[in-house]
Image (spheres, grey):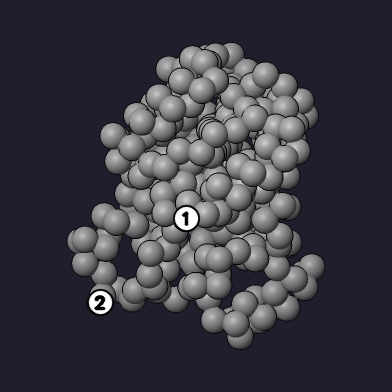
Amino acid sequence: MDFKDKVAIVTGGGRDIGRAVSLKLAAAGARVCINYAHDEASAQDTLSRIQAAGGQAIVHRADVSRSEGVAELVAAARSAFGDRIDVLVNVAGGMVARKKLADIDEAFFHKVMDLNLKSVLLTTQAVVPHMGEGAAIVNFASLAGRDGGGPGAAMYATAKAAVMTFTRAMAKELGPRGIRVNSLCCGMIATRFHDEFTKPEVRAAVANATPLRREGRPEEAADTAVYLASGAAGFINGANVDVNGGAFFS
């Protein structure tokens, strides 16, 4: 999996799974544009790790749920590394909050959809004009998109299911141009997402019910994402790949 001289944009690339993706792409030779929205310290730490290992990267703050932010992100990547973009990894997303049906209002609906689905649409629209044959897009969906998610996760699960369908649609549309589009459907990965939104006893129960009897690690999700972005996965297109330790079989 050689990414020498290739350019990659990783949304949500500063922490957790996004950090692991950024580090692994850079270690494989890619020049990485690390996007973040809020956590500058984590993004800068990711950048420092890449540079300390001899890699090339930049950090750019942008809200990728807004077209203006996406345009600025792509412009920053092009300014730093040239007009060609070879890899887009859409990690940015989140649950925002757990809400049952009666508590979901229009503002919450739009916030979750913008963060998880609209962001993928906007980045894809902005990056594809700078991609050529052999380029790849990797989206992050979720196990929640397959099974409906846990209590209060209806909107998050719905958005991630839409990411899965959008992935298939783009695989068909962009495939003739030699651009592959795939996604990951991660189960419980040990990240700040679950630190914030999942109770410890629930995490323990889910881990114990998983055939591998543990949570996944960010690096394990990143390994799959980098593989899907690489030439080694050259005939994989439109796949929603399960990374869940056997918790769910599609």
Disc marking residue 71: none
For residue 112, which quarter of the picture? bottom left
Separation of disc 1 and disc 2 at Cα? Answer: 32 Å
- Residue bearing the label numbered 1: 39
Element marked by disc 2: helix
| In the depicted structure, whether residue 203 falls above or below residue 4 | below
What residue lies at 66% left-to-right and 48% top-to-bottom?
Answer: 20
According to the picture, the residue beneath numbered tag 2 turns out to be 102
Q: Nearer the viewer, mark 1 or mark 2?
A: 1
Question: Residue 55: x percent and y percent?
Answer: 70, 32
Compared with 192, 126 (above or below) is above
Q: At label 2, which amino acid type do we have?
A: Ala
Give the residue drawn at x 26%, y 69%.
104
Kind of residue indicated by mark 1: Asp
Q: With 243 as the anchor, is 35 left or right in this view?
A: left
Residue 130: give x, y in percent of width and height: 47, 17
Residue at far left of view: 106
**Residue 178 appears left or right of 233:** left
Vertical arrangement, residue 178 with respect to residue 136, above or below: above
Residue at 41%, 32% in the rendered image: 73
Q: Tell me which numbered mark, 1 or 2, is placed earlier along the sequence.
A: 1
- In the rendered image, which quarter contains the C terminus? bottom right
Residue 204 x/y as whole percent: 67, 80
Q: Quadrant of the N terminus?
A: top right
**Residue 187 vs residue 2, the one in the foreground:** 2
Number of residues whose C-alpha sits closer than 10 Å to that of mark 2, classed few (under 14), some (14–19) or many (20 or more): few
Q: Secondary structure at mark 1?
A: loop
Q: Residue at x 51, y 38 (%)?
A: 59
